Image (spheres, coloured by chain):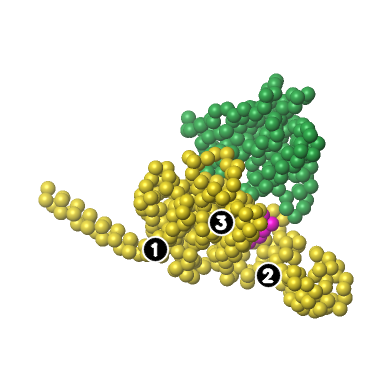
Chain colours: A green, B yellow
Amino acid sequence: MEYLIGIQGPDFVLVAADNVAASSIIQMKHDYDKMFKLSEKILLLCVGEAGDTVQFAEYIQKNVQLYKMRNGYELSPAAAANFTRKNLADYLRSRTPYHVNLLLAGYDDTDGPGLYYMDYLSSLAKAPFAAHGYGLNKRFILNLPSFTVRLIDKEGIHDLEKLTLGTK
Amino acid sequence: MALQDICNFQSVFEDSLTTEYPAVPHGKKIASNYVSGLPFSNNKSLFHFYIPVAEYLDESPIQFGQISTVQNCSADSSEDPFLTSSTLPTCLPFASSQSVPLPFPMAHGTTTLAFMFQGGVLAAADTRSSCSGLVACPASQKILPIHSHLVGLTSGTSADCALWKRILARELRLYQLRHGRRLSTSGAAKLLSHMLHPFKGTELCVAATLCGWDGGETGPGSRGETTKNQMTDLFYVCSDGTRLRGMLFSVGSGSPYAYSILDQGVHWGLTVDEAKSIAREAVYRATYRDAYSGNCVDMYHITSKGWTRRNREDLKEEYYREKERRKHEKTERRDVTFSD
């Protein structure tokens, strides 16, 4: 079970994702990073079906970078979120829908911080706080051992200390 | 009837005289083959192969052996390459287009493991090939060398793994010839992952662990985390799309048992002999408890000089040695209690 959470503050966005890469009941990796850097101030957090997450997230990542190379300036977080949603929607009714749940967090120099919630049915919502998954710590049957935490503000993306919540 | 629909064989003989072909995916190329009536005769050009697989890809994977919600089709067909072809026509599912998870996820009947340590990468695997409850081959090879510094461990359907290993080896060699340098393990894993992506949702089942050493030839590597200044790399690639880099992986039905030995024993500072004995013990324990793993153990060690293979060792000997040891201990204990 995977978990993503994002909180938008007055001039920052704080995001965290768990670090488990699982294959059915076995944890294959416990230091897996689920955040994809789209640009200097935009992060895409992606969970869902095994191969779809990486394929889709890398596709979006490369397209955002291509936009920057072609046009000389970066996509804003709102534009990147809408682009991602459009791609999800296009693939939804095709032969190969992507089963991924996403959070896109970014800082726009004019609009400020933004957090966008997207799910596998290609819905998009800009929200002050959002999450995917079950984040309960004591009550859930599986405990997620550690979380990567990052902060985005006007200076860019900062790595914060990894949270290791054991069984408290 | 269903198979004819898939292979378009019916239309080959019916429309062999017409050049227009309504459902042709590739346009004129294939029509020219069909005009002559036989799909295999390509007198037009040497490069127009008839590759049946390509046409299947243009059709929906639903019609090509998609894993269905009909449980009995997919339940025990994960390990047998023989039976899957016969189940294709009978279980054409008309279920949802999303891939449905197999009812029994740990269905790869094998134990393979690989880990990195200061002396390189060590890979070990058992040698039993099972086919729906019986041992099809007690001496199969699950560790296949791809080139001098890259080794792949296979798990899943044996036929699929053997084929995809060969395809990967071919692609890596082509890359080397075209670009003048060897592709890194990370690149090879990504290549394999992208090649397997179109088959996601079909019954293709390949879970490969790639262990390699990236030499100076591979050029300036964009490796963010240098694994303690070593050039070895270890990747797990699965046909469902997973691609993970790590220090320790074990795949297969015997992997939980192997993990239990490895998780407590493996650390970076192992010597080569210690690492070999841990790997051997892990495979032995997995074969002890898992019905689908057994017979012998293969071990490969990858260093900067390439891979070296240890002689295949029959675990039957180890089993009997342990039984002797246990019996010996029991008699000793009995003697001790009597002498008190």
- Nearer to the camera, A61 or A134: A61
Mark 3: give few (<14), some (14-19) or many (20+) Cα within 10 Å: many
The magenta-colored residue range is: B197-203
Secondary structure at badge 2 equals loop
Tell me the distance, in whole angstroms, between the alpha carbons under discs 1 and 3.
Answer: 24 Å
**Res. B60 image quadrant:** bottom right
Q: Position of residue A75 (x, y in %)?
A: 77, 34
Residue beneath disc 1: B311
Q: Is residue B133 magenta?
A: no
Are labels 2 and 3 on one chain?
yes
Q: Sort mark 2 into few (<14), some (14-19) or many (20+) by Cα contacts within 10 Å.
A: some
* Residue at the (61%, 29%) spot, across then down: A150
Of circles 2 and 3, the one toward us is 3
Q: Identify the chain of the residue marked 3, using the numbered disc in the image.
A: B
Give coordinates of residue A103: x percent, y percent: 68, 35
Work out how far the residue at label 2 is from the one at label 1, CA to CA, in angstroms: 43 Å
Q: Chain of mark 1?
A: B
Residue type pointed to by label 2: Pro
* Coordinates of residue B82 in the picture (x, y in percent): 57, 71
Q: Quadrant location of residue A32?
A: top right
Residue type at the position of mark 3? Ala
Please state, as top left, top right, bottom left or bottom right, where the N terminus of chain B lies in the image. Answer: bottom right
Residue located beneath label 3 in the image:
B207
Q: Name the residue that disc number 2 marks.
A: B89
